[in-house]
Amino acid sequence: MCFLLICTCPFSLLAQFYQKTPEVILGSTWKDHQFYSFKEALLHPDQVYELNLSHQIYTAFPPEFMELTELKSLILSHSQIIYLPKELIFLPSLKALTLCNNPQLDLSANTAILAEMPYLEILRLDSCHLESFPEGSIYFSKLRHLSLSHNQIRHLSKDFFQLPLLQSLDLSFNLFEEIPADIAHLSQLTQLNCSANLLRELPAEINSLTQLEKLSLGWNSLREISLNPQKLTRLKTLQLTGNPLSEEEKKRIQALFENTDIIF
């Protein structure tokens, strides 16, 4: 299991289930190219693959920031950020942007800057007090990994589902009462996390996600799991912990998905 443990704690379980591997974006030698301040990064601007500025507060970025032409991943978590620095649009190699734990972040006000980052592949917006995701998903046409966990999102617009390359989507710890039928349009999804929401049933369209390998539906109010094993043939891990499933329903699911690792 690899993305963001099997134990009684839902937070730690989800952390293991959907933990991302930075090698996807940064390459196998990424640890040799990590920096944790502007000062050290600007000493070797052409060697910086990842810049982690978490828990650091900047009202403006230095002009030399644009010299980081090899920067692939920028982490600005816990930075009290409201508006994204306009310098981001001048970083041609930037593919991963992490903005977690910035409750004052005004995502809609930053759409113009995000629109100028067409090569972004990973976007993490966990714990940002978001109530929605801005329209204009066409701006994120290259996005492969999107994490919106621990927000207050109840609905997603139809526009959201126009992400043709999206492979992993984390919607856990939100306020969804249903998974929209438009989820079927995300045909490249291999990992979907809808844990810790308010789900009572699953849409039939979820069976259209034939590339799914990992599906997490734990800590909802599901009494029946309406998944089709003949369509979800690639499913390796199914996480169902914390749902009010009867023993009979558990046995039925196990019989249907006998080649899948099911976690109750």
Image (spheres, rainbow, N blue to C red):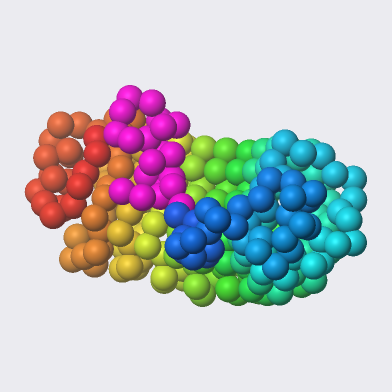
Vertical position of residue 210 compared to residue 227: above or below: below
Vertical position of residue 65 compared to residue 91: above or below: above
Q: Is residue 15 magenta?
A: yes
Q: Residue at x 37, y 62 (%)?
A: 190
Residue 51: % across, % down: 67, 53
- Front-most of 58 and 216? 58
Q: Residue at x 74, y 50 (%)?
A: 40
Please state, as top left, top right, bottom left or bottom right, where the C terminus lies in the image.
Answer: top left
Residue range corresponding to the magenta coloring:
1-20
- Front-most of 99 and 52? 52
Q: Main structural element of the magenta stretch: helix, strand or loop?
A: loop
Vertical position of residue 241 compared to residue 144: above or below: above
Residue 77: % across, % down: 68, 42
Residue 146: % across, % down: 55, 57
Task: Residue 199: tell me if it is visible.
Answer: no
User: Left or right: where does residue 86 sit relative to residue 44?
Assistant: right
Q: Residue at x 21, y 65 (%)?
A: 233
Residue 206: % across, % down: 36, 60
- Front-most of 23 and 159? 23
Vertical position of residue 32 compared to residue 19: above or below: below
Q: Residue at x 78, y 50 (%)?
A: 38
